[in-house]
Image: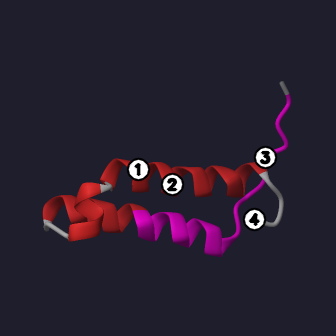
């Protein structure tokens, strides 16, 4: 399988990093939204970053 990988745009990378950082902070300090849905939000952050790598202009 041959994948054409590209560098994600800065905005895509920053959105995924911000979500991941908020989840990590939510694990340390109990935040209502981020503590309960931590694993799902980390998955969303990873999928956003994956989409930025696999698709052009994302």
Left or right of 39 in this view: 31: left
Which residue of the protein is positioned furthest toward the left in this rendering?
Answer: 29
User: Around disc 2, counting alpha carbons within 10 Å, would you say few (fewer than 14), some (14 to 19), or many (20 or more)?
Assistant: some
SS at mark 4? loop
Q: Mark 3 points at which residue?
A: 5
Most extreme residue toward the top, as rendered? 1
**For numbered disc 2, what is the local secondary structure?**
helix
Q: Earlier in the sequence, mark 4 or mark 3?
A: 3
Question: Label 4 belongs to which residue?
Answer: 58
Q: Check contact, mark 2 vs mark 4: CB within 8 A.
A: no
* Of callouts 3 and 1, the N-terminal one: 3
User: Contact (CB < 8 A) between labels 2 and 1?
Assistant: yes
| Residues at marks 4 and 3, CA–CA distance in whole angstroms | 12 Å
Where residue 45 sits: x, y (%)? 50, 57
Q: How far apart are marks 4 and 1 (CA)?
A: 21 Å
Q: Residue visible at 31% across and 54% down?
A: 38
Foreground disc of the pair 2, 4:
2
Residue labelled with disc 1: 40
**Which quadrant would residue 22 be assigned to in this image?**
bottom left
* Residue 50 tag number: none
Q: Quadrant of the C terminus?
A: bottom right
Say what secondary structure mark 1 lies in: helix
Q: Mark 4 or mark 1: which comes first in sequence?
A: 1
Say which of marks 4 and 3 sits in front: 4
């Amino acid at each position: 399988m041959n994948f054409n990988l590209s560098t994600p745009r800065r905005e895509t990378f920053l959105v995924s990093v911000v979500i991941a950082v908020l989840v990590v902070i939510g694990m340390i300090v109990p935040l209502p939204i981020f503590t309960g849905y931590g694993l799902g939000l980390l998955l969303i952050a990873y999928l956003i970053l994956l989409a930025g790598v696999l698709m052009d202009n994302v």
